[in-house]
Image: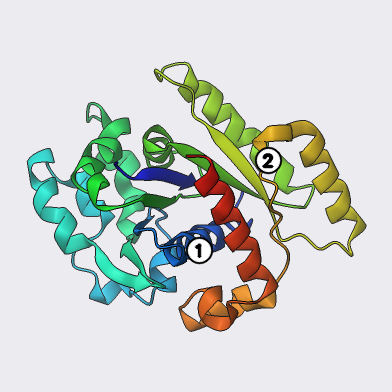
Amino acid sequence: MDARILAVANQKGGVGKTTTSVSLGSALSRQGKKVLLLDLDPHACATLHARIYPEDVEISLHDIFRGQAEDWAMLWPGLIRPKALQGMDVAPGDIRLADLESDLRDQSAKGSILTRSLGYVLPQYDFIVLDCPPHVGILLVNALVAADLLIIPIQTDFLALHGLKLLFDTLHTLNKVLPQPIQYRAVPTMYDMRARACRRVLELMQQKMGHALFATIIGVDTRFREASAQGCTIFDIDARSRGARCYEALAQEVLELW
């Protein structure tokens, strides 16, 4: 069976998007799944997390978007870094991804480039995780069109709820033209049970989203910051930590969907 594609996105930055992409992908890999992480964010945070630096990148996802369809079969093997991060393969991002809005302005079918190009690697993986940029544009549209499931990390903070509305507006627009609606689930992140505001936001999310919310709640854990600083995952820092156990639980929920 071809890989399931998980797009991790929220149109508000700083909500744990890259942390979720990296940690969930790692947790799935630790479950024996073959995982590919695609860094679609021009800031390339997931790429840097894997200790892949710009000067060492000869082929990036930018080349997939700007290349010809007949070149994709040749580009993917040179692009993918095997087991670059906790057993996951990584396809590095590039600051030049920010130029795609203008580069692809006149190109036809530009919203399905990723879907079509991934056909060359789908049979090799169980899951492909897309770390998406935090703004509406051609990259986010490509990710949503390709995704079997959109995972929305939502920081348990009132300001984070505004970003959720923006993302739902984008989903509503895309669902008007797509043959099937985009399936999504949200996951609460950065939860501090000691903070009354966090508890209130979580209650609101549970009331408003119901079954569209994962049962797993990702709590605050300083080891996420340590992992980012050291270019590894929380499982490398402490596989028994609270944060690691949270993402193991989230991975289990994802596996139960299929």
Instruction: Give the amino acid type for the residue marked by disc 1 in the picture.
Output: Ala
Q: Residues within 10 Å of mark 1 (few under 14, many from 20)?
A: many
Q: Is residue 139 above or below residue 224?
A: above
- Observer-nearest of 103 and 240: 240
Instruction: Give the amino acid type for the residue marked by disc 2 in the picture.
Output: Leu
Residue beneath the point at 51% across and 22% down: 173
For disc 1, the marked residue is: 27
For disc 2, the marked residue is: 213
- Asked whether the viewer can see residue 9, the reply is no
| Image position, residue 205 (x, y; %) | 77, 40
| Image position, residue 142 (x, y; %) | 36, 37
- Observer-nearest of 240 and 157: 240
> In the visual, does 236 lie left or right of 195?
left
Q: Is residue 169 above or below residue 125?
A: above
Outermost residue toward the right? 196
| Image position, residue 80 (x, y; %) | 24, 62
In this rendering, the label closer to the viewer, 2 or 1:
1
Residue beneath the point at 56% across and 35% down: 184
Residue beneath the point at 33% across and 75% down: 53
